[in-house]
Amino acid sequence: MAKGYWVSVYRTIADPERLAAYDKLAGPAVRAAGGRTLARGGSRVVAHDAGVAERVVLVEFDSFEQAVAARESAAYQEALAVLADSVERDFRIIEGLD
């Protein structure tokens, strides 16, 4: 079964305090849903083409279905409510290769 991944690229961060509050809720929600954060950062990013050198987060799940369910979980929805409109990001759930 192919793994599932969350890929999140932050274009802008308007409120770092709300992002920090989101992180405190999102981290445990992701782990509880079986997710493993593989990369999270913004200090060492080399952007190419139309990319922006902002925060990038990569989370791995055992399956695509698990990744989708984690995004829909009540715990993660609570984290999203805190984040609200404090960032502009490109968030995708993708299926990995076998």
Image (cartoon, helix red, strand yellow):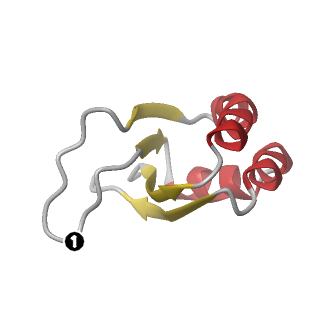
Q: Position of residue 52 (x, y in %)?
A: 29, 59
| Residue 42 sits in quarter | top left
Q: Position of residue 92 (x, y in %)?
A: 48, 64
The one nearer the camera, 20 or 70, is 20
Residue denoted by label 1: 50
Q: What residue is drawn where x is 57% and y is 52%?
A: 67
Q: Is residue 63 left or right of residue 81?
A: left
Tally of numbered discs: 1
- Please tell me whether residue 61 is drawn above or below residue 98 in the rendered image: above
- Please tell me whether residue 68 is drawn above or below residue 16 in the rendered image: below
| Residue farthest to the front, as pictured | 14
The one nearer the camera, 2 or 90, is 90
Q: What residue is drawn where x is 38% and y is 53%?
A: 2
Q: What residue is drawn where x is 48% and y is 58%?
A: 12
Q: What residue is drawn where x is 65% and y is 48%?
A: 15
Q: Is residue 98 left or right of residue 69?
A: left
| Residue 65 sits in quarter | bottom right
| Residue 11 sits in quarter | bottom left
Q: Is residue 54 left or right of residue 36?
A: left
Q: Amino acid at mark 1?
A: Ala
Q: Secondary structure at mark 1?
A: loop
Q: Position of residue 7 (x, y in %)?
A: 43, 54
| Residue farthest to the left, as pictured | 48
Q: Is residue 24 left or right of residue 94?
A: right
Tell me if mark 1 has few (under 14), some (14-19) or many (20+) residues whose alpha carbon lies within 10 angstroms of its own: few
Q: Position of residue 10 (x, y in %)?
A: 46, 55
